[in-house]
Image: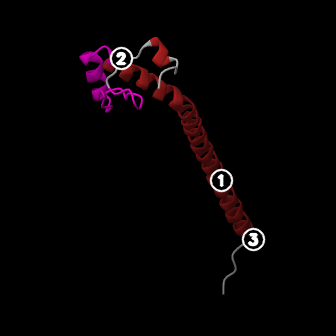
Amino acid sequence: MRRIPRPFVLTLAAALGLTLALVNMALFEANRALQLEVNTRAQYIQQTVQLEGLNREIVGAIAQLAVRDNDDALRTMLNQHGITVTASARPTPAGTQGTPATPAARRGLLP
């Protein structure tokens, strides 16, 4: 059986080590790029959650304006964004169905 020369084995081991080091560097850079993308998306999600309440308030105010002013342009704009606005009658306090509210009734002086 023929023996493989020792320098050849050492050269092969060095080449394998260099190849593995290069692969490790490439994977490290790819991982770093993916981590940057994930961190950017996480920051975007956190900012979106923080602004969700403000967004709801703005949409509610626009919807109230559309109903109050009977503004078809605002209703159309909201509908284009998937928001349906319907006008509902204002509820009257119990016991005052249709009676005009006098100043005394508003202060709770009348039954």
Q: Label 3 neighbourhood size at 10 Å, few (<14), some (14-19), many (20+)?
A: few
* Amino acid type, residue under disc 2 in the picture: Pro
Q: Residue at position x 48%, y 25% from top?
A: 57
* Amino acid type, residue under disc 3 in the picture: Arg
Q: Which residues are magenta?
A: 68-97
Question: 95 and 56: which one is in front?
Answer: 95
Residue 6: which numbered mark, if any?
3
Q: Position of residue 97 (x, y in %)?
A: 34, 27
Q: Secondary structure at mark 2?
A: loop
Q: Position of residue 61 (x, y in %)?
A: 42, 20
N-terminal-most mark, 1 or 3: 3
Which quarter of the figure is the N terminus placed in? bottom right
Q: Residue at position x 46%, y 29% from top?
A: 56
Q: Residue at position x 70%, y 62% from top?
A: 11
69, above or below 90, in the image:
above
Q: CA distance from mark 1 to mark 3?
A: 27 Å
Q: Label 1 neighbourhood size at 10 Å, few (<14), some (14-19), many (20+)?
A: few
Question: 15 and 77: which one is in front?
Answer: 77
Q: CA distance from mark 3 to mark 2?
A: 108 Å
N-terminal-most mark, 1 or 2: 1
* Amino acid type, residue under disc 1 in the picture: Asn
User: Residue under circle 1?
Assistant: 24
Q: Position of residue 82 (x, y in %)?
A: 31, 33
N-terminal-most mark, 3 or 2: 3
Q: Nearer the viewer, mark 3 or mark 2?
A: 2
User: Residue under circle 2?
Assistant: 100
Question: 62 and 98: which one is in front?
Answer: 98
- In this view, which residue lies farthest toward the front? 111
